[in-house]
Amino acid sequence: MRINQEYPVWQKKQKRLPTIKKISDGSDVVYLTQYEITDSPMPSRRYRRLPEPVKDAIEQLYEKAQKKPREAIPEIMELLQKYPDLPTLYNYLSVAYARSGQKEAAEKVIEDNFRRNPDYLFARLNYAEILLAQGELEKVAEVFDHKFDLQILYPKRKRFHSSEATGFMGIVGWYFVKIGEQEIAERYYMILRQIAPDDPMTRRLRRKLFGGWLEHLLAPKSDKKEGEAEARSLKGE
């Protein structure tokens, strides 16, 4: 089970990524309009209002949810008692549950986060992930209001974090694979290759689109080297 995790605002990567231009249109809103993708921190208004000690605790929980998930769970739940309207905490809690092997609990938290925070992008992405796995394709479209472009979904924003863009394109690309719109899905994949060639979402969408030998041909060199090394190790070389 893959969960799209919000990156902590304190990670200060300054690499500037390309803008995206319109690629398609149709009956549903299937556009990729021009907007900026950045790796720079983008703290939400809710986060900026938090006391500094709470921000520090959340920063630590980002790592702990992945590396020591069973320890992180009670700490996140304690913070949720004080800050029940902070969607990031639900995001981290679902990650901790998933990393500790508690899939049903993770899915319950994801659904709860979407119900409480339907406009929070990572709540949308993770709930759509569950629906895609279950084959509930019409509900996936409803999660995004039938708007498959970030700026149309969030018209007041001109800039998105790279984790938002890769998560969105990876999920939406998978959706179009599922409904048989291969050409549109390939366009999302080509943009993912441009902005995040080694990201797990890019790799997964490539598998969904192509699979097998064609996936190997299209993979970045880093992916191919990893695969060749693994094959050698299996042969005992």
Image (cartoon, rainbow, N blue to C red):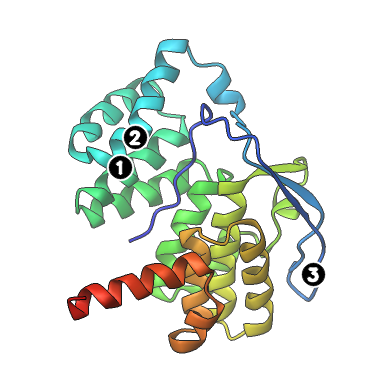
In this view, the mark in front (2 or 3) = 2
How many numbered badges does the structure rendering display? 3
Q: Residue at x 81, y 60 (%)?
A: 21
Q: Indicate whether 145 appears above or below 206.
A: above
The secondary element bearing badge 3 is classed as loop
For marks 3 and 1 on the same chain, the one whose residue lies earlier in the sequence: 3
Based on the displayed image, in which of its 4 quarters is residue 107 positioned?
A: bottom left
The secondary element bearing badge 2 is classed as helix
Q: Indicate whether 88 appears above or below 209.
A: above
Please state which amino acid type lies under the numbered disc 1.
Gln
Where does residue 209 sit, x and y in percent of width and height? 53, 81
How far, Cα to Cα, is label 2 from label 3? 36 Å
Read off the residue under disc 3: 23
Q: Residue furthest front?
A: 237
For marks 2 and 3 on the same chain, the one whose residue lies earlier in the sequence: 3
Based on the displayed image, in which of its 4 quarters is residue 119 positioned?
A: top right
Tell me whether the residue at label 2 lies in contact with that at label 1, contact meaning CB atoms closer than 8 angstroms.
Answer: yes
Q: Residue at x 20, y 48 (%)?
A: 100
Q: Quadrant of the C terminus?
A: bottom left
Quick check: 29 left or right of 202? right
How far, Cα to Cα, is label 2 from label 1? 5 Å
Read off the residue under disc 1: 66
Few, some or many residues within 10 Å of mark 2 (<14, 14–19, 20+):
some
